[in-house]
Amino acid sequence: MKIKFIAILIAGLLTQKVAAQTKNKTYTKNLKLQNTFQASGIWRGVFNLKPGVDVPFNFEIKNKNGQPYLSFLNADESFDGGFVKQKGDSLWINLDQFDNVLAFKIQKDSLVGVLKKQDGSGKALQLSASKANQYRFKTNDQTPDADFSGKYDIVFKSQDGKNENAVGLFKQLGNKITGTFLRITGDSRYLEGSVDGNQFYLSGFIGSSPSYYKGTFSKDGTIQGEAVSARGNTPFTGKQNENAALPDATKLTFLKEGYKTLNFSLPDVNGKKISLSDDKFKNKVVILTITGTWCPNCVDEASFISPWYKENRNRGVEVVGIHYERQLDSAYVKKALGRFRDKFDIQYDQVIAGKPDKKQVAESLPGLNNFLSFPTMIIINKKGEVAQIHTGYSGPATGKYYTDFVSAFNAEIDGLLKQTNL
């Protein structure tokens, strides 16, 4: 018995020693990685969108306030991602704007990981990244057949037969091409890619979900291609037309017959009810924006309206952000709207109206007819009546469309401010 006990004791001690050695080796390996791995620099990431479909994007990591910080690079834009955190052979970036996280495992000088929701829900998207190559799309370096820059009438063809008109805006320099697709609901933001002969490839990523378009140009000015996503492909065709245009964004959504204004009483994150009948809105021009923290075009709108409000609030204007969020529990809403407020330094009211679907919008704002898009901006005059409803948002990626919107918006507000109070 005594001999057996000693044998068991020795075996236990050996097991502990092996475990300690393994732990020390892991610690040493992780410490070596921390000391040798350099996160700083420009990276090329590649999403495996689905079997056989890889979507590239670029990002840069550099110091911000003394900490490594990731920014997404698309055409002329550098879009804030989040702070980079490293522990051992793991690297992760919380993309708070879209409640996502990039989680990587370090493999020497490359990264392999996933894009997933911060709470772990939904399906993760596989990706890898390397600093070895900083191009966007790998092409055959074939000389482009022509310069396909310009404006195009585009028709997206859905499976249900409901075609959607759009405008394609492209700028080509050699093999490099940038652009966007402008729809009545908003634009595709900054896309970047390559032209190889007559074939083109465009992608974009800012932390939500990747965008990918591919197709061919023809010398006769026609274009055909498809928007590719994990859910399926949407084909499109088009023709170059410098007069390509969309319907007037102020004529798409309107009030139902018998309505002159919108009546609502909705809570902010602290439960305080806010209504247009509140004293702070009397005899003022009020801008309502139907928005959501998850919406890329809403992000562009907030980056415009927040500084505009701070510059113009003393002129007799107010803004209310009417939010439709993917989750409505109080903890999530406080987190999402708090991040949105901090990111854009929002100093106007934000209220919660429901989840982001047309039915919820109709229930919370019953006076609206033909609601089409997040965001939608509603301008109320000093009498409390709706003066204009603007569907969608054309952000900075659309160039002249954006500057034209800013000019028209300011002219509308200036005119309403000059009107006499009741």
Image (cartoon, rainbow, N blue to C red):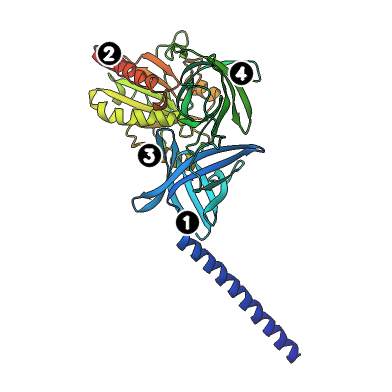
Label 4 to label 1: alpha-carbon separation: 44 Å
- What percent of the width, then of the height, locates residue 243? 44, 11
Look at the numbered disc 4 and give the secondary structure of its residue.
loop
- What percent of the width, then of the height, locates residue 312? 26, 26
Label 3 to label 2: alpha-carbon separation: 31 Å
In the image, what residue type sits under mark 4? Lys
User: Mark 3 and 4 residues: CB-CB less than 8 Å, in contact?
Assistant: no
Q: Which residue is mark 3?
A: 343
Structural crowding at the residue carrying mark 3, measured as other residues with C-alpha within 10 Å and reported as few (<14), some (14–19) or many (≥20) = some
Where on the picture, by quarter, is residue 303? top left
Label 2 to label 1: alpha-carbon separation: 53 Å
Q: Which residue is mark 2?
A: 415
In the image, what residue type sits under mark 2? Gly
186 relative to 73, above or below: above
Structural crowding at the residue carrying mark 1, measured as other residues with C-alpha within 10 Å and reported as few (<14), some (14–19) or many (≥20) = some
The C terminus sits in image quarter: top left
Q: Which residue is mark 4?
A: 157
403 relative to 194, above or below: above
Q: Is residue 324 in view?
A: no
Q: Which residue is mark 1?
A: 86
> Which mark sits nearer the N-terminus, 1 or 3?
1
213 relative to 332, above or below: above
Instruction: Residue at 39% x, 49% y: name it.
Output: 62
Label 3 to label 4: alpha-carbon separation: 36 Å
User: Mark 4 and 1 residues: CB-CB less than 8 Å, in contact?
Assistant: no
